[in-house]
């Protein structure tokens, strides 16, 4: 596992297509913005893996985050 430090606005690139940017820090909460191709499923780690997150499965991108969601 790679552990690095980033400040607000700084990015981490994973391969040519995935970018993770620290978009905010408030107390112990860190907000990240993730840019990835639609073929890559992105989910929070605490969520149970399910069939929808298998490689090649369709990804539901209809949900949106409001100001209070992390």
Image (spheres, helix red, strand yellow):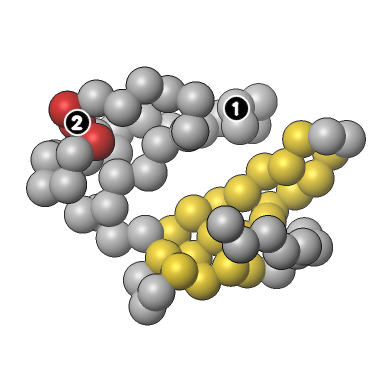
Q: Residue 20 at what x, y percent from top left?
A: 54, 60
Q: Residue furthest bottom?
A: 16
Q: Position of residue 33 (x, y in %)?
A: 56, 52
Q: Within the image, what quadrant is residue 64 found in? A: top left
The crowding category of the residue bearing disc 1, from other C-alpha atoms within 10 Å (few below 14, some 14 to 19, many at least 20), is few
Residue 39: x and y in percent read: 21, 54
- Quadrant occupied by the N terminus: bottom right
The residue tagged 1 is 69
For the point 29% across and 33% down, which residue is it? 62
For the point 19% across and 31% down, which residue is it?
Answer: 52
Earlier sequence position, callout 1 versus callout 2: 2
In this rendered view, identify the residue nearer to me: 51 or 17.
51
Residue at left offset 63%, top offset 68%: 11
Instruction: Name the residue carrying label 2.
Output: 52
Note whether 2 is above or below 56 in the view shown: below
Indicate the quadrant containing the C terminus: top left, top right, bottom left or bottom right.
Answer: top right
User: Residue extending furthest front?
Assistant: 1
Structural distance between the alpha carbons of marks 1 and 2? 21 Å
Q: In the shown orientation, is residue 11 left or right of residue 51?
A: right
Image mark count: 2
Question: Mark 1 and 2 residues: CB-CB less than 8 Å, in contact?
Answer: no
Residue at 75% across, 48% down: 24
Residue 27 falls left or right of residue 64: right
Above or below: residue 51 compared with residue 42: above
Q: Which mark is residue 29?
A: none
Q: Residues within 10 Å of mark 2 (few under 14, many from 20)?
A: few
Question: Circle 1 sits in a helix, a strand or a loop, which is it?
Answer: loop
Q: Is residue 28 left or right of residue 31?
A: right
């Amino acid at each position: 596992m790679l552990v690095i430090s980033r400040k607000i606005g700084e990015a981490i690139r994973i391969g040519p297509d995935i970018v993770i940017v620290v978009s905010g820090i408030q107390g112990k909460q860190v907000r990240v913005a993730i840019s990835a191709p639609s073929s890559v499923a992105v989910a929070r780690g605490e969520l149970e893996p399910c069939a929808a997150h298998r490689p090649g499965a369709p990804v539901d991108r209809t949900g949106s985050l409001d100001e209070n969601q992390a």
